[in-house]
Image: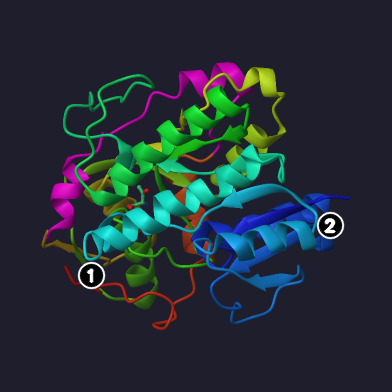
Amino acid sequence: MSASLVIGANGQIGSELVDALAAAHGDANVVAADLAPPRAPGRSPFVALDVLDRARLGEIVQRHSVADVYLLAATLSAKGEAAPLDTWRLNVDGLLNVLELARERRIARVFWPSSIAAFGPHTPRDPAPQWTAMDPTTMYGASKLAGERLCAYYFARHGVDVRSVRLPGVISHRTPPGGGTTDYAIAMFHAAKRGEAYRCFVDADTTLPMIYMPDTIRAIGELMAAEPSRVRIRSSYNLAGMSFAARTLADAIAREVPGFSVRYEPDFRLAIADSWPASIDDREAAEDWGWHAHYDLRAMTADMLAHVVADPAIIPANAGIQH
Ligand code: AKB
């Protein structure tokens, strides 16, 4: 049987995707790849890989009979502003390395996530349509928009079976996110569980599209399982989960954790958040491959509070990002 390769397997989404793919296809049929081994070894084989090393990527694909590549290695929006050129290189050149393998027919299919960060100030905010003005203001957003066009190009020009969704902020409790603007939503839960007040780096009224991890993993699975003819959009599909203001999330948490409080002290990440839409129109994903989110704010909050562990080592709730 041919294997699936998850690149960025130690990350927020990668760590959960490896397990979901292994549950569906068997541990031995998923290869987890990242720069260094995970702290706790998983049941699937692990390979050390820098996606910018094209020769090693090719060797791994051949050695493990890889058919599908899930490319999740990326630098996110806030962290990306501290090292814009490295961000472009990882996010765009990494994708090109994978698309080239598919063009050469050494792999069959590619999953790559775009982001709501590909939208910008001229995108209609509420909701952002599938086809619309896209003028991202961050290097991360620019790299995601470029990536979308590369995916569409490799499909149209070379018949590469590449599939993508524009991910909202992904909320999860298992593996911390790595330097995004939407990270405040996760950090709020950790502060609440530790009995601390949270210092929030966006405004109380900042409203962003978010999605819970189980819906994220299901969306990736459903898109990859769809008949190729149903995947009409080969740049990237809009995907909606839920949308809420930072204050609305704080109130939802405080209802379950009495006394929880948030202080709003926006930093440079507010401007990034303000350049993104508040909600997403995902009708095309619904029509083409049946997408429908299961988790709303209430269900996500209950599940997060049931699972988040009050461990200071997991995510420093008030940590800033050097800019
Ligand atoms: C970020 O905040 O950078 C990411 C994203 C929306 O893609 N979570």
At x 11%, y 62%, the residue is: 265
Which residue has dot 1 on it? 321
Q: Residues within 10 Å of mark 1 (few under 14, many from 20)?
A: some
- Is residue 254 among what the camera can see? no
Tell me if residue 194 is in the magenta stretch: no
Q: Tell me where residue 218 appears, x and y as whole percent.
A: 62, 41
Amino acid marked by disc 2: Gly
**Which residues make up the magenta segment?**
267-294
At x 41%, y 31%, the residue is: 149
Residue nearer the viewer, 106 or 79: 106
Q: Describe residue 34's horizontal placement relative to residue 18 as left or right.
A: left
Q: Residue 315 is drawn in which quadrant?
A: bottom left
Amino acid marked by disc 1: Ile
Position of the C terminus by quadrant: bottom left
Count of labels in the image: 2
Residue 26 disc label: 2
Mark 2 vs 1, N-terminal side: 2
At x 38%, y 64%, the residue is: 189
